[in-house]
Image (tube, rainbow, N blue to C red):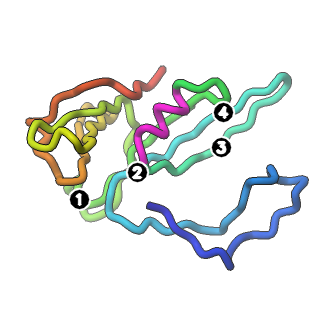
Amino acid sequence: MFSTLEGSEIATPLGLRDPDEHHWPYVELLLQIPWLFVTVVKRKKHSSLRRQLFLLYPEQLAGIASGRSADIESAVLVTPPHMNGSDKWRFEDLTEVWHCVDPETPELSAYIYVVATGREYSSSLLEANPQKLIRERQIYTAVH
């Protein structure tokens, strides 16, 4: 979950932003969980606009991938130290995301992330055993 303070909002003139858009100088990550750093390209008739998104939920990535308003140029999995086995956050190119079922708690969503090195990370509310997860459907695959 990302957070920021209302009082820190940057006053950007309407001509430089969409009416429902707000600008912030920072966001804070409240939980030590994986998240996605995604670059999308919005193409218009004579131009294109690249934007970077911080996404918390894999379904958000799937929604962008299946939509027509923007193309995913790259997706990076960002993992906390306790998940990647190092002493710092790690950014790795994402190649696949799978929605999974944990047979012990089928009502809760679980995910397997596959990065470019072939390493797999799992994420679930109850820290499910990755070997027990059943891959139900692929919700993202990188296009190269």
- Residue position marked by numbered label 2 in the rendering: 35
Residue 86 disc label: 1
- 58 within the magenta span: yes
Residue 128 disc label: none
Residue 41: percent from the left, percent from the top?
A: 66, 33
x 44%, y 26%: residue: 142
- Residue position marked by numbered label 3 in the rendering: 51
- Residue position marked by numbered label 4 in the rendering: 41
x 59%, y 26%: residue: 67
Instruction: Tell which circle, 4 or 2, labels the residue nearer the N-terminal end.
Output: 2
Q: Amino acid at mark 2?
A: Trp
Residue 143: percent from the left, percent from the top?
A: 47, 21
x 61%, y 36%: residue: 40
Which contiguous range is marked in magenta? Answer: 57-65
Instruction: Tell which circle, 1 or 4, labels the residue nearer the N-terminal end.
Output: 4
Secondary structure of residue under mark 2 = strand
* Above or below: residue 5 compared with residue 73: below
